[in-house]
Amino acid sequence: MTIDWWTLGLQTVNAVVLVWILARFLFRPVSRILAERQAAAHAALDEAEAAREEARAARDTAQRETAAIAAERAARIARAQDEAAQEKRRLLDEARAAAEKARAEGMDDLARLRATQERDLSVEAGALATDIAAKLLARLPDEARIAGFIDGLAEAVAKLPETTRAGIAGGGPVTLRSARALSAEEQAQIAQRLGAVLGTPPALSVETDATLLAGLELETPHAIVRNHFRADLDRIRAEIADHE
Amino acid sequence: MDNPLSLEPLFHLGPVPITAPVVVTWAIMLALGLFAALATRRLSLTPGKLQTVLELLVTTVDSQIRDTMQRDPAPFRALIGSIFLFVLIANWSALIPGIEPPTAHLETDAALALVVLAATIAYGIAGRGLGGYLATFAEPSWVMIPLNVVEQITRTFSLIVRLFGNVMSGVFVVGIVLSLAGLFVPIPLMALDLLTGAVQAYIFAVLATVFIGAAVGESHGPAGQDQKDLPR
């Protein structure tokens, strides 16, 4: 067995050249495209990861915003409920105050109406009492409508202070009102009775006032002395009103 | 009768005799080169069928190198892949009538083994440095230096003889059966030669990978991360 050294050498060179050819035209291009695809896949993965991170961040942001909106909504609802409750309380207070005011006004009106009615009743009662008294007095003799009141007038004058009585006695004529026209005898009797109390008979200016019903009224610059039914009725009515 | 293992020159290029294995090798180189140039002319990120096949070939070679060496396969891809492809095509060239595979001749196998030996030494020196590579001959002890040197030679011879014996025997068997039995009788044996040729190509490439891997040493990093800047 012999070795063909030329063939061995040529085949060695051929092997080296073939390695270079395949490296140049097959393995490097294919490995390069593999590396490029791998890099593209990595880039796509990185991009997808970045997109996922971005989506996650967007989702977190949306969740935070949703939570903030929910919190804001809850706060606004609470605020609105508070405001509604305050408004309700305010309206109720106002309604209550208005009702109270209306009630008070009603009570005032009622009180005024009652007072008016009472006054009217009092006036009617006074008128009725006057009528009753007048009708009763009509059954008495006319002398009784004056004579029965002369002593009372004198006693009332006597109870006046000394200075007042002195003023009456020493002053000008005093007005004497009577329920009816006085006779001269009655005027003399009254002057005589007042003179007994005052010391000197006063000068009398007699006037007739039917509203007195019965009795006399002496009017001086310093005092009025009443002794007649009208004054009594007025006093009684005032006492009744005070009593009520 | 002529020695069937002897080579007769087909023609001469000056003083250089050109034999049949050289011509067949040139034809294989031309076919592979043209195919590679045409196939890789329009590579894209969305591969077609042919590109997918090429990528499968490259990734398979890479995977084999990575599994064997535990290293980045890029510096060794072209050498191992080219040896595998050439041996495979050369072995299968026996299917073409009148063509005798170049690997059925000792010179071609010896040339491939010499390339592997040279690559082993070159990668070893590149990976470890000259001193480091020579120091591997004294492992585990300086006593082992003669044995390690002999091992370098014998395993190169084993590469040569294994490939030569398998391919040559297949060719001889087919030729003998063809001369004795008839035209179609050797077909099963030729089919067996297809399998034998593929297996021998794989074995040659894997052994080359193992020898180079042993020369460059173990990687201290993960596969795909080269520790030293090896030539690519």
Image (tube, coloured by chain):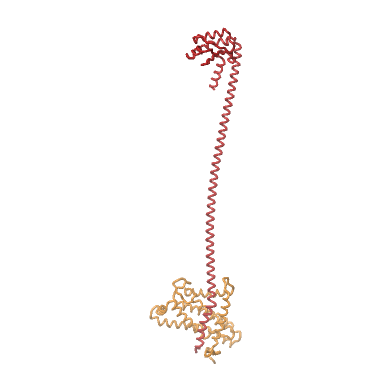
For the residue pair B159 and A222, the one nearer the viewer reads as A222
- Viewer-closest of A13 and B70: A13
Q: How far across and how far down the image is residue A232, in percent?
A: 55, 16
Extreme front residue here? Answer: A172
Q: Residue at x 48, y 82 (%)?
A: B115
Across and down, in percent, residue B65 comes to: 49, 75
Answer above or below: position of B202 versus A148. below
Residue closer to the observer: B50 or A171: A171
Quadrant position of residue B19: bottom right
Classify A151 as above or below A31. above
Q: Residue at x 54, y 68 (%)?
A: A40
In the rendered image, residue B201, in percent from the top left (x then y), is placed at: 52, 80
Residue at figure coordinates x 55%, y 16% from the top left: A231
Q: Which chain is red?
A: A
Relative to A98, does residue A1 appear above or below in the rendering?
A: below
Picture quadrant where residue B29 is located: bottom right
- Quarter the N terminus of chain B occupies: bottom right
Letter of the chain shown orange in the rendering: B
Does B200 sit above or below residue B45? below
Say how many tags the image has.
Answer: 0
- In percent of width and height, residue B128 lies at 43, 77
Decide if residue A227 is in sight here.
Answer: no
Residue A211 visible, this angle: yes
- Residue at far left of view: B142
View extreme (top): residue: A185
Name the foreground residue: B1 vs B16: B16
